Amino acid sequence: MRSVVRQVATEADMEALGAQLAAGIGRVRLVYLHGPLGAGKTTLVRGMLRGLGYAGAVKSPTFTLVEPYAFDGTMFYHIDLYRMEDPRELEFIGLRDYLARPGVCVVEWAERARDLLPAPDIDVMIAAANTGRRVQLVGHTEHGAALIGGLA
């Protein structure tokens, strides 16, 4: 396990951090994002997608639950479980299917279904700080720890 803490002052800084994550994504498949509403989770995802070369619109999946992005032969699934009231609802959105497909899955509010989800490669915790946000990144797997180590 490896952990890194970053201070992020602006929205542009959060996007830049996302792009840095994307640059080393390699074999990382599963990333969980934690933080209150408005913390910058979707901004981080937008930065990841930009870092992977996606130029289209990036929106929060709060109401759609899943936003899939396909580009350059890569699939990227942005999943938001905020509105999930019962973990069994995950079956209705086909979450297991998304997790079984090749590509990257980034899940917001994973704690709402933690017992039903596999362990992530990386956990990202975003919290308010005096000036901006405090972002802690924890790599749990070999690939996740290597990516986090590259950010240190």
Image (tube, helix red, strand yellow):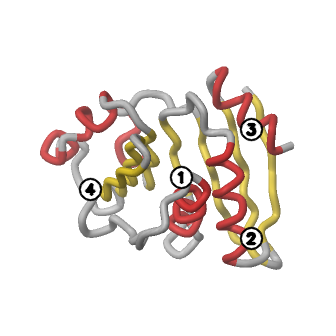
Residue 2, given in percent of the width and then of the height, sits at: 76, 31
Kind of residue sitting beneath label 2 = Asp
59 displayed left or right of 147? left
Point out residue 120 in the picture as x, y percentages from the top left corner: 52, 33
Separation of residues labelled 4 and 3 (CA atoms)? 29 Å
Which sits earlier in the primary sequence, circle 2 or circle 3? 2
Name which residue lies at 65% across and 31% down.
144
Q: Residue at x 67, y 77 (%)?
A: 11
Query: Which residue corresponds to mark 2?
Result: 13
User: Tags 2 and 3 in contact by the CB under 8 Å rule?
Assistant: no
Residue 111's place in the image compared with 140, above or below, is below
Number of the label disc, if any, that sits on residue 84: 4
> In which quadrant of the rendered view does residue 88 lie?
top left
Disc 1 packing (10 Å; few <14; some 14–19; many ≥20): many
Q: Nearer the viewer, mark 2 or mark 4?
A: 2
User: Which x, y percent locates residue 12?
Assistant: 70, 75
Q: Residue furthest right?
A: 152
Give the number of marks.
4
- Tell me the residue that label 3 is attached to: 148
Asked whether the beta carbons under mark 2 and mark 4 sit within 8 Å of each other, the answer is: no
Sequence-wise first label, 4 or 1 = 1
Mark 1, residue position: 33
- Label 4 vs label 3, nearer the camera: 3
- 4 w.r.t. 61: above or below: above
